[in-house]
Image: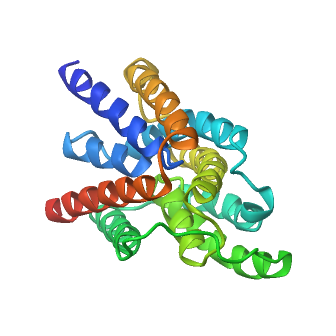
Amino acid sequence: MELWIVLVPLFFLTALIYSMAGFGGGSTYLALLAFFSVPYQSMPQTALLCNLVVVCGGCWFFIKGGHFSLRRVLPFVVSSIPMAYYGGTVPIGKKLFTLLLGISLAVAALRMLLSGYSFERRTELSWRNAWVTGIPIGAVLGFFSGLVGIGGGIYLSPLLMILGWADSKEAAAAASFFILVNSMAGLIGQFSKSGLSFEISEVLPLLVAVFLGGQIGSRLGSQKLPRLAIQRITALLILYISGRLLLQK
């Protein structure tokens, strides 16, 4: 019980901050659960459920704000969904799990911090180029998302900005949708691998916390915060969590 009293406010803050950038916060939920020595078998399922709660609200607010384009994200989603399910079924050891998570987060965060300006959309992505690029990349992101319990938006969002296919708010909207569908697929894969690995009564307070945090953060990110602030907040958080994970290894 004492553990959950500590985790509930931390999960609330995580959802609040990450939802500003269209993310669910799965990477940080995993890091917090690992830091407090929660059994790692239940970590991906818990993180994916929290992701779903947060990004459902994020999708709604970013769509309402006019930042979402299905054309931009659909090619990535088509291949990521089955691969996220498959990744969720693959067994993985704790050491490899932590290493993969820490390294991948560091790569994403460092790239977003390399520039002192906000990435803006420079080109309108053609339908053909979107599919040629999106299918293989979506498959890789989807597999890794299901494997470690992350929705994958932390990879798709900086990718879209770096390529000049979206500004930060458009990328946040795409990330929310991408995380939503991949979290669903990954969670189904996790359940098929090991069944339900936690008690609902234990996870419910965390779900309530991330729902409240996500509702507040999504409103701020889609309507109030400038694009560069969203970009920097997200990158710094991801880099911090990555460092903590790698140092624990």
Q: Quadrant of residue 125?
A: bottom right
Q: Does 196 appear above or below 93?
A: above
Expressed as whole percent of the image width and height from the top left, the position of residue 161 reads 56, 70
Q: Does residue 91 appear left or right of residue 122 in this picture?
A: left
**Residue 71 location in percent, x, y?**
80, 62
Q: Quadrant of residue 167?
A: bottom right
Give percent across and percent down for residue 109. 36, 67
Please state, as top left, top right, bottom left or bottom right, where the C terminus lies in the image: bottom left
Please say if 32 is above or below 152.
above
Nearer the observer, 167 or 74: 167
Marker count (numbered): 0
User: Observer-nearest residue: 30 or 126?
Assistant: 126
> Residue 129, relative to residue 145: is it above or below?
below
Instruction: Write the residue at 77% across / 82% down.
Output: 132
Q: Quadrant of the N terminus?
A: top left
- Is 220 or 87 nearer to us in this picture? 220
Residue 87: x, y in percent?
56, 61
Q: Closest to the observer: 241 or 216?
A: 216
Q: Is residue 110 left or right of residue 223?
A: left
Asked if residue 173 is positioned above or below residue 64 in the image, the reply reads below
- Spot the residue most to the right: 127
